[in-house]
Image: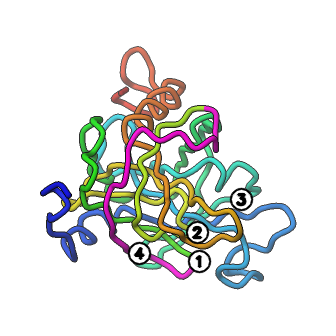
Amino acid sequence: MQAAALSDHGPATYSDAGQSVVKVLPTWPGYGRPGFGAPDGTAPEGSGFFLHPGLGAAQTDFVVTAAHVVSRAERIEISDNEGRRVDASLIALDEARDIALLKAEMTGQGIILTSRQAPPVGLHACAIGNPFGLGHSFSCGVVSATGRKAGFQAIEDFIQTDAAINPGMSGGALVDAKGQLIGLINAIYTKEADIDAGVNFAISSDLLLKGLARLSKAFCSPTGEGMLSHCP
C-alpha cells in the first residue's frame, strides 16, 4: 500500500470541508416536501457543496450537486450544517456528466479544490454527505481506483473508493486528508439493494471542473461582468 494511505485525517478535515457541504432537499412530483409532510429519509434527498465555478473556495451562493438529485424537482431547498434552510434555484444541468449547479438564497464557504490530477491509489478519501436524510456524516476509506467507467452516464471519469456511501449522499464531497475536494459523490455499486458494498464512485475533480466550465459559460460575459465574474 502506498505511503499516501497512511496520511492522517480527522476533525480538521471535517472542519475544513464539512462547513461547505449541505443537504439538498428536492421536492419531487408525488412526494411530500422533505421535513414538511414527509419524514426525513422518506422523500428523495441528496447532498451538495458550496463551490464557485470560477473562484473555488471563495464565499459563494453557488452549490454543486448531482443532476439526478434535482433534475425532476418541483422545488429545491438546501440546509447547511447549522440547520439553516433556504430555497435554491436550478440554474444549469449537465445530465451527461450528472452535474447540476444551484444558486442558493444564502452564501457559504466554497470547498477547497485539489489539482485536476487523478489522486494516487491508496490515498485516504473521506466522504461527507447526508445518508438516509440523517444529516451530515463523515466516513473515510481510500482511493481504490481512478479512471473508472461504470456505465451509469454518458460521460464518466470515476474515482472508486471504499469510504462508506449510502443513499442521500449523492452530490456530496469526496475529500482528501487536507479537506480538499477530489470528487463529487455519485453512485454506489450494488446488484440487490441500496446498501454500501464498499465499491463506490465519485465524479473526478477534473471531470467536475470541465463540466462546471461548460455550465458556467452561460453566466459569464465577455467583459467579466456576468453572473460569474471570473470564468474558468
Marks 2 and 4, Cα distance to the nearest angstrom?
Answer: 15 Å
Marks 3 and 2, Cα distance to the nearest angstrom?
Answer: 17 Å
Q: Residue 148: within the magenta?
A: yes
| Residue at screen point 63% across, 63% down | 190
- In this picture, which residue range is highlighted in magenta? 132-154
Which tag, 3 or 2, sits closer to the chain's start?
A: 3
Asked if the residue under mark 4 is in contact with the one under mark 3, i.e. CB atoms within 8 Å, the reply is: no
Query: Camera-side residue: 153 or 92?
Result: 153
Which tag, 3 or 4, sits closer to the chain's start?
A: 3
Residue matched to label 2: 168
Position of residue 94 in the picture relative to residue 52 (left or right) = right
Name the mark on residue 81.
4
The three-letter code of the residue at mark 4 reads Asn
Task: For label 4, count other residues whose C-alpha is less than 10 Å away and answer few (under 14), some (14-19) or many (20+).
Answer: some
Marks 4 and 1, Cα distance to the nearest angstrom?
Answer: 13 Å
Residue matched to label 1: 133
Which tag, 4 or 1, sits closer to the chain's start?
A: 4
| Residue at screen point 87% across, 67% down | 30
